[in-house]
Image (cartoon, helix red, strand yellow):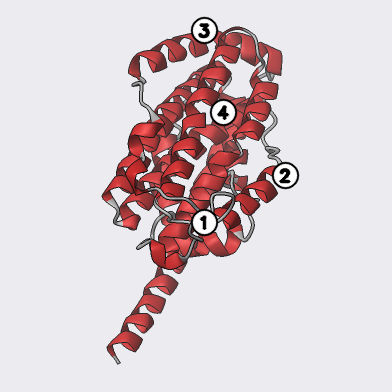
Amino acid sequence: MKELTQLQLLTELEPVVERELERHMKAAKEWFPHEYVPWSQGRNYEGIFDGEPWSQEQSPMSPTARTALIVNLLTEDNLPSYHREISDTFGRDGAWGTWVDRWTAEEGRHGMVMRDYLLVTRAVDPVQLERERMSHMGQGFEQDNDEMLRSVAYVSFQELATRISHRNTGKYTEDPYCEQMLARIAQDENLHMVFYRNLLAAALEIAPEQTLQAVRDVVATFQMPGHTIQDFGRRSVQIAMAGIYDLRIHRDEVLAPVLKTWKVWDREGLGAEGEQAREELARLLDDLDVAASRFEEKRDAYLERQAARRAG
């Protein structure tokens, strides 16, 4: 089967973008970031207003919860680079351009409300946070998935992963107001996931072989958009140890359900390249299952040792 060019794919899928954009606008609920911030808790920091310096004792937030919140926020902060990347991939014309701008506007609320909440409640060191923001954004963001189908496949998984990360972080903080804020952000992320997931489903009907290969490539190389954050490896292990986001969640709650929705395992009439891509996807999920089980065993053993030390 002859592959479609990027222009052909964009043209073929534009009616789907129009339809999904209309559905999205009906489903999206207006909300206001300032309503999720307990402003009455705020007070001046050290600086030109001669306020109180930040110290960790000012917040009951656990170190792991703080780490997850910082990673989530710094990830959201790189929105200008994400906008540039999807704008370059999808274009600025027609329904594609309208979606790019709408998505960007909705995503902009996430970093805004998270930063205000964390600074007002003194959950994070504002100086360190700003230094990390400057460092992270200074690197920009360049996706490996510059081809349109790979981009859509990536964001289908990534938006769901982000939704889960926000929701689980909120629960882990044991702060009902923080959980409420992150749950609201997660609702946006879910609608974005549905948009991209439905768009990719349409691509599977138009160009099944080409699309399956793109999905395979993304699953094989997937990284969260915040992977360039300082000490991301160490922090991601800390987050995984807490069960906020780990390999098991990635496989069972992100990859598997999206692939099932796309009917990847039930599709008929695929050519040799499509069948090969599907077989490789199955192997990738099997490998992730093994890796997730190994990590769970190590985590359980570590937690048992920690509990024994505390008991002793």
In this rendered view, identify the residue nearer to me: 247 or 228.
Answer: 228
Estimate the spatial distance between the alpha carbons at disc 3 and disc 4, rounded to whole Å.
16 Å
Of 218 and 82, nearer the camera is 82
Mark 4 burial class by Cα count in 10 Å: few <14, some 14-19, many 20+: many
As measured in the structure, the alpha-carbon distance from the residue carrying label 3 to the one carrying label 2 is 37 Å
Mark 2 lies on residue: 138
Residue 139 falls left or right of residue 268: right
* Residue 163 locus on image (x, y percent): 41, 40
226 above or below 274? below
Reading the image, the residue beneath label 1 is 287
| Real-space CA distance between mark 2 and mark 1, rounded to the nearest whole angstrom | 35 Å
Kindly check if marks 1 and 3 are in contact, taking CB atoms under 8 A apart as contact: no
Q: Quadrant of the N terminus?
A: top right
Q: Amino acid at mark 1?
A: Asp
Residue 196, image x, y percentages: 49, 26
Pointer 1 local density, CA inside 10 Å: few below 14, some 14–19, many at least 20: few
Mark 4 highlights which residue?
A: 152
Identify the residue position indicated by label 3 in the image: 15
Q: Residue furthest bottom?
A: 312
Point 34% across, 56% down: residue: 173
Q: Is residue 69 above or below residue 297?
A: above
The quarter of the image holding the C terminus is: bottom left
Q: Is residue 101 visible?
A: yes
**Which residue appears at 49% of the width and 18% of the height?**
202
89 shown above or below 122: above
Q: Quadrant of residue 152?
A: top right
User: Which mark lies nearer to you, 1 or 3?
Assistant: 3
The residue positioned 68% from the left and 27% from the top of the image is: 84
